[in-house]
Image: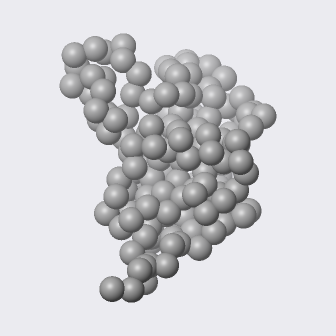
Amino acid sequence: MSGHQLAQLNIAALRAPLDSPESKDFVDNLDRINALAEQSDGFVWRWDESYDLDGGAAANGSDPKAPTHPFGDAVVVNLSVWRDVAALQAFAFRSDHVDILRRRREWFVPMDQAYAVLWWVPSGHRPSVAEAAERLDALRRHGPSADAFTFREAFPPPVAAAG
């Protein structure tokens, strides 16, 4: 065993605000899809915007306008940790999640650059949105590598050092 788990970030630019009629079906399915993820084999953890892992003021109420992520208010952030690539693939592409995925163009603007990134983290590590943004930026700048990759070009977890 490598002692690592798979982190993933995907972002999506909204066509309309979350509280708009155009986004209603997406919003109405969030709790169901999040629960499906959390019940999936291999799920470990997911970031929730109700708390700010980057240590900002948004979560504690001192500045309600402080962003909780670097992508802006019109961007939906999904950050989670999974046992491995196979577990995440099973949830993303072989569960009821795929029905929502097929409808993404109804709610989100197509992006002309990478919007999803995978990377290995030590078991128990919970990545911040800032850390995830750095991985996405690395993927965009350098293409897939062991530090930031995609489903299409996945890398194995690091080998645990003997010791």
| Left or right, 5 with reference to 26 | left
Q: Quadrant of the C terminus?
A: bottom left
Kindly tell me whether residue 60 is visible in this rendering. Answer: yes
Question: Percent position (x, y) of residue 90?
Answer: 58, 68
Q: Quadrant of the N terminus?
A: bottom left
Q: Quadrant of residue 22?
A: top right
User: 37 above or below 32?
Assistant: below
Q: Nearer the viewer, residue 141 or 14?
A: 141
Q: Nearer the viewer, residue 105 or 152?
A: 152
Q: Residue furthest right?
A: 112
Q: Residue furthest front?
A: 163
| Left or right, 160 with reference to 148 | left
Question: Percent position (x, y) of residue 79?
Answer: 47, 47
Identify the residue at horizontal 39%, vertical 86% (top origin).
162
Identify the residue at horizontal 44%, vertical 39% (top origin).
129
Q: Nearer the viewer, residue 13 or 66?
A: 66
User: 126 above or below 6?
Assistant: above
Indicate the colouring scheme.
one colour
Question: Percent position (x, y) of residue 116?
Answer: 63, 47
Looking at the image, how many numbered discs can be counted on the residues? 0
Q: Quadrant of residue 85?
A: bottom right
Question: Percent position (x, y) of residue 133?
Answer: 53, 39
| Left or right, 112 with reference to 61 | right
User: 24 above or below 48?
Assistant: above
Identify the residue at horizontal 50%, vertical 63% (top origin).
120
Kindly tell me whether residue 89 is visible in this rendering. Answer: no
Identify the residue at horizontal 45%, vertical 43% (top origin).
131
